[in-house]
Amino acid sequence: MQVKGTQILVKALKEEGVDQIFAYPGGQVIDIFDALYDQKDIEVILPRHEQALVHAADGYARSTGKVGVCLVTSGPGATNLVTGIATANYDSVPLVCFTGQVPLNLLGNDAFQEVDIVGITRNICKYAVTVRSREELPMIIKKAFYIASTGRPGPVVVDIPKDIQVAMGSDEYPSEVSIRSYKPYDSVHMGQIKKALSCLNKAKKPVFLIGGGVNIAHARQEMTRLAELTGVPVITTIMGKGAIATNHPLYVGNIGIHGSFAANNAISECDVLFSIGTRFNDRITGKISEFAKNATIIHVDIDSASISKNIAVDIPIVADAKIALEKLIENAKPLKIGKWVDTINDWKEKYPITMNNYEGLTPEKVIRYINEHYKNSIVTTDVGQNQLWVTQYLEIDENRQLLTSGGLGTMGYGFPAAIGAKLANPDKAVISVNGDGGMQMNIQELATAVAYELPITIVVFNNGYLGNVRQWQELFFNKRYSSTCLRYRKSCERRCMSNDECCPPYTPDFVKIAEGYDAHGIRVTDEKDIAAAFEYADSYKTGPTIIEFIIEREADVFPMVPTGNPLGDMIMSND
Amino acid sequence: MYMKKRWISLYVENQIGVLAKISGLFSGKSYNLDSLTVGETEDPTVSRMTIGVTSDNVTFEQIKKQLNRCVEVIKVMDFTEMPVIKKEILFVKINSCSEKDKEEIFRIAKVFSLSVIDYNRNTALLECVQSENRNDDLIKLLNELFVNRIEVVRGGSVAIESISITDR
């Protein structure tokens, strides 16, 4: 049977098991929206901005492991996706982004709302393609889902000119796909596995360093089993956090520029560093030449380009984390490293991460409340201090998941991602933790959360600053708070150093903003009101609630490794 | 950091945008791209690129891995240490030639095994198919002999595995 391009697209979405898509209409996709209007299997979610749209699809994908699907119009609709595509690309999130395009005969004509979105996104996605004939449309969609979801997952852009959307063609959607130039690894080199284990077995001071790859591969159980089997302590990156339950006795903490003392020291002093699914990004290595200086480094990664990119690796293993872990478990044995484990535990006890030096309401207390009261939940963060505090204090196990923009560090990510996560996981509590700066980058999504009756708890830590940059200015720029005060008004002195009651009031009033969107809002200034505020939010089952926590204006995130320092060289507090 | 000249032969899908993808990878990651040639192969769905880069060992390993992970790349071959035949086409136009200049040009052509493929009263056009290094030398020589009078266009190297040496 002959069908329109839009009809084969809808059929393809169904065949790929898509139940929700994140979509914003426009001139060049109006036919697709018309085709979607008639069917019941796919819920079309309308966010209020395309950047938020792609972050919502990202939150949907990260929280389910399924492909997140975006549909936007050409030109500005497409360019608004760019930040979200780059975000997903960095954190290996499977997305398929459909963009409308001007008709083929106008391509290159500088037509209304024409941009070369494939050219724009080429370097920030896994694969991008403009469909050039109706015949190839079904196979391109099939390939897009396959490429996005296999190997190291990532975003794929499919640009569909308007005339192809309405052109008639076959109604067949292929069930299989084979791409000669793309063959993801589905096995592991046993020789390398044995080599790695024989190296691990000889170690006196080994550690596992686990990145996001283990979480993406859904290999938490395997990771926990390997750790328990060998008795080797586990350190994670921010993206790897949760690869083993954070309350597990073998879990040490996060490494990196805001990692724990125990974790950073263990990495600096270990003799075998067994890493799985991490890129050795500059935020975790500190000074490269000092990183795990005395260690033999084993590195498992599905992306061979991640191996020996930043850190020279002694034993490389190219494989999916889950497949590698299964083989490791089969061949691993317990290590006698009691003394080393004791040393690490001493560090953990002696130098815990804490905000006890600040009085009253602190982010730590709020996050600990979340730990206690939301056992079955998804927590998203924005970027900045709010993210660092959450990744320091949030406890994660198989029932609580963390979604955060780790690689690109995208402000404005957290709240829309929570919308995607809540839509995909209606039975889980979803809490979005933000700073006052990032909250305003996609605040319009309150309308989306209200429209789809999503009871998301939105935490805003309000310190009136772009706090992370302010902290750097405090520590390394002599407190010259250049453009980081969000209470600044024209009437202020340009080089204001004051931080007191004379400052102009904060804008906006988040509680009133919430009310304006027909959502709920509450402001908390005292630690004793934390519980009541969360209970207030929980009492609303059909819409979002903002809880604005007014926190110490100049609270810092510690420990901290200044740029260029070795990991072990940490500032523990600003006293 | 041992910088040296290296060669890659790359099989890619013969599709729109693939050249931009590959060249964009080099610019985006600040790799030092010296030359890149591309053309369709015996199979019209496949193109083959010959890429010359100057880099250290670590970066070169990264370059090969990054190329390999591109969805459109079918095969990456490192030609740096392999026995290959490698040639570059070079045209040089020499302007304002005197009779004496022309005599010199024909002498050079003989010694350097190049052809004078076109000329008129005061202009000569040389064609040279040699290694990249030899072409460099020739341009240097012509630049010295005919100051501000030469016009150069180069094709970039193409390379293929040699037969006789590989067989041994």
Image (cartoon, rainbow, N blue to C red):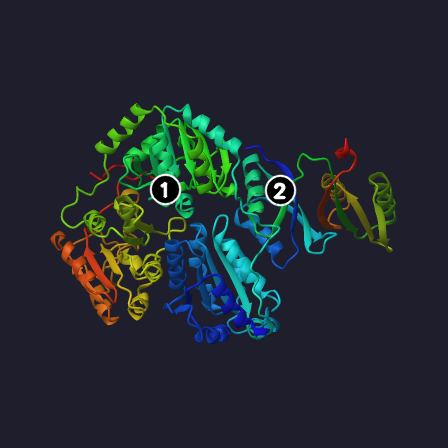
Which label was assigned to residue A221?
1
Which label was assigned to residue B53?
2
Where disc 1 sits, the SS reads helix
Relative vertical location of residue A511 with respect to residue A463 in this rendering, above or below: below
Whole-percent x and y of residue A413? 35, 57
Where disc 2 sits, the SS reads strand
Q: Tell me which residue sits at (42%, 50%) in the image.
A: A91
The amino acid type of the residue labelled 1 equals: Gln
Q: Quadrant of the N terminus of chain A?
A: bottom right
The amino acid type of the residue labelled 2 equals: Val
Q: Is B69 placed left or right of A259 in the picture?
A: right
Whole-percent x and y of residue A488? 25, 59
Whole-percent x and y of residue B118? 85, 54
Q: Residue furthest left?
A: A528
Disc 2 versus disc 1: distance between alpha carbons?
44 Å
Q: Residues within 10 Å of mark 2 (few under 14, many from 20)?
A: many
